[in-house]
Image (tube, helix red, strand yellow):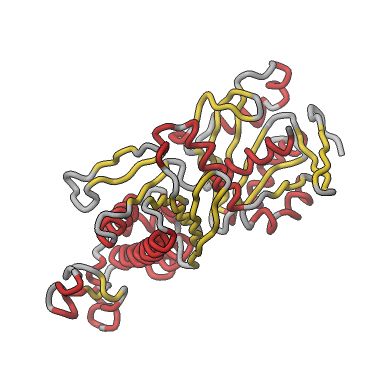
Amino acid sequence: MTRNCCLLKTRRKKNVCYLFCKAMPWFGMDIGGTLVKLVYFEPTDISSAERGAVKKIHHYLTSNSAYGSTGKRDVHLQMNNVLIGGHRGTLHFIRFPTSAMNVFLQLAKSKGMAFMSSTVCATGGGAFKFEKDFHQEMNMELHKFDELDSLIRGIHYIKAYNKPECYYWANPTDDEKCKKEYFDLNNLYPFLVVNIGSGVSMLAVHSPDNFKRVTGSSLGGGTFLGLCCLLTECGTFEEAISLAEKGDNTKVDKLVRDIYGGSYSKFNLQGDVVASSFGNMISKSKRDSVKREDLARATLITITNNIGSIARMCAVSEGINKVVFIGNFLRVNILSMKLLAYAMDFWSAGSLKALFLEHEGYFGAVGCLMELMKTGN
């Protein structure tokens, strides 16, 4: 198998022969159940001949922040002057719905991507699901990497190059005092990673090479969006979040005060704590008066509270006091971040800290690109 402008190297490892295309462009893909996260490395130190070989696809990717109706480039996350595979350059971050994979393949084919590279690295469940599509549509092979290995490797790579990567929310329940504060990643270990995508995975990380999956949950970002689509007839994640920001979950949820007439002081349960998610929907009169916005907010709080509760128990069980929340569920979702920040602090009496990372759901894509560079050396 050959490609123009492509030098192929082979390496035998455990009786498996890997093909690695050293020519540009270099991509990393994390194909999740809801979103595809794509990172593109734009070298700034290559020759004019090498640059000419990828000029068409490079110009298309970097001159646009939107691709069709669903593809987006997160310009604010762009990382400049990074070192990858011995080259200096810029790392771009692109996302699109997994449901638009066929559109992506046709677009990539039209831009000549199939003639520039014979191997693309990928991780996530979709790396297996769409492997045949890549081969049939573009005659390209997917070099698959483990999802959790890629996730951790991506976190460590980005935190090394993007110093203001990690942050927390100070005074999360006070709108006037609440603010974003940056956290020093040099003192991060050990930490619990809570990766919130379509579902949720939780990993205890003690060093770059010492980590394990502790548990997970099927109730994640995909659950939130799916329920919102059913309950509010919204069409996108952004619309669901926008509805939730305007809603009042107390019209949907049954609170402690609805049961006790106030707080349950013996166990430090304040009256405004949710006692039963969607508990008020038992009443027909309350169902008739509830709004779409209220349902969206109650759904968001239900999912967020569940994730926070499991994360706290895992952290306590593992003896860890720093919990790092990542994943595309947190994109444009400040409400959930503040809820998680408050929950970690309150229910642990200040012993647990909720941390967040700027690049949210892109770590798997970055990590598998790093794996490909290592394989090709």
Of residues 28 and 287, the one nearer the viewer is: 28
Q: Quadrant of residue 279?
A: bottom left
Of residues 37 and 307, the one nearer the viewer is: 307
Q: Quadrant of residue 213?
A: bottom right
Q: Is residue 332 left or right of residue 174?
A: right
Q: Quadrant of the N terminus?
A: top right
Going by the picture, which residue comes out furthest to the top? 48
Q: Quadrant of the C terminus?
A: top right
Position of residue 244 measured from the top left corner of the image (x, y, whole percent): 32, 59
Q: Quadrant of residue 240?
A: bottom left
Instruction: Tell me the residue at 46%/56% (across/down).
Output: 196
Instruction: Tell me the residue at 83%/44% (across/down).
Output: 17
Residue 38 drawn above or below residue 97: above
Going by the picture, which residue comes out furthest to the front? 319
Position of residue 95 measured from the top left corner of the image (x, y, whole percent): 54, 45
Position of residue 157 measured from the top left corner of the image (x, y, whole percent): 54, 37
Of residues 358 and 53, the one nearer the viewer is: 358
Position of residue 173 measured from the top left corner of the image (x, y, whole percent): 21, 53
